[in-house]
Amino acid sequence: MVGISNHEENYPNSIFRGERVIASDSVIVVSFPNLPIGQYAVSVYQDSNNNGELDSNIFGIPKEKYGFSNNIRRPIFRQSLFNFNNDMTITIQIR
């Protein structure tokens, strides 16, 4: 699951655009054509059990792999932001 957010409210759950992708390799490429120029934050998680949610334990710690733009470890919108100005590629490691 890949989500692009363009505002801080309810990040990372508020998604401007999203894609569900079948992970068939260790490197997955997701494209968002016609994305307007602006500032965005991306969140990614691997839905291992295919329930449409990022599962977490009783302490709120994710049980499934996840990641954010700029490879930060917590969903902090301002730290995840990047400027999108044309065709570009970002890389996110999920852990």
Image (cartoon, rainbow, N blue to C red):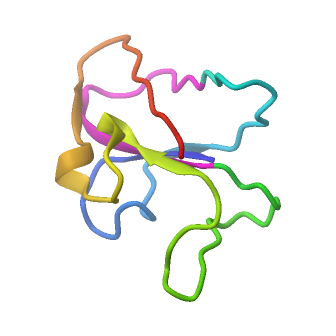
Image spot of residue 65 (x, y percent):
60, 52
Asked whether, in this view, residue 55 is left or right of residue 7, the answer is: right
Q: Which residues are magenta?
A: 30-45
Where does the image place residue 32, in percent across and percent down from the top left? 52, 26
- Report the residue that reaches farthest toward the top: 87
Q: Nearer the viewer, residue 77 or 56?
A: 56
Choose top left, top right, bottom left or bottom right for residue 15.
Answer: bottom left
Query: Quarter of the image holding residue 37?
Result: top left
Judge from the rendering whether residue 74 lies leftward or rightward of residue 51; answer left or right. Answer: left
Q: Position of residue 14 (x, y in %)?
A: 42, 62
**The quarter of the displayed image where residue 42 is located:** top left
Residue for point 79% across, 66% down: 51
Assess whether residue 34 is covered by the magenta stretch: yes
Q: Residue at x 30, y 48 (%)?
A: 6
Q: Is residue 88 visible?
A: yes
Q: Where is 71 relative to 78, above or below? A: above
Q: Position of residue 86 (x, y in %)?
A: 30, 13
- Residue 43 visible within the image: no
Along the line of sight, which residue is nearer the eye, 72 or 37? 72
Residue drawn at 44 percent across, 24 percent down: 91
Residue at image coords 23%, 33%: 82
Q: Is residue 24 left or right of residue 87?
A: right
Above or below, 36 relative to 85: below
- Magenta-colored stretch includes residue 54: no
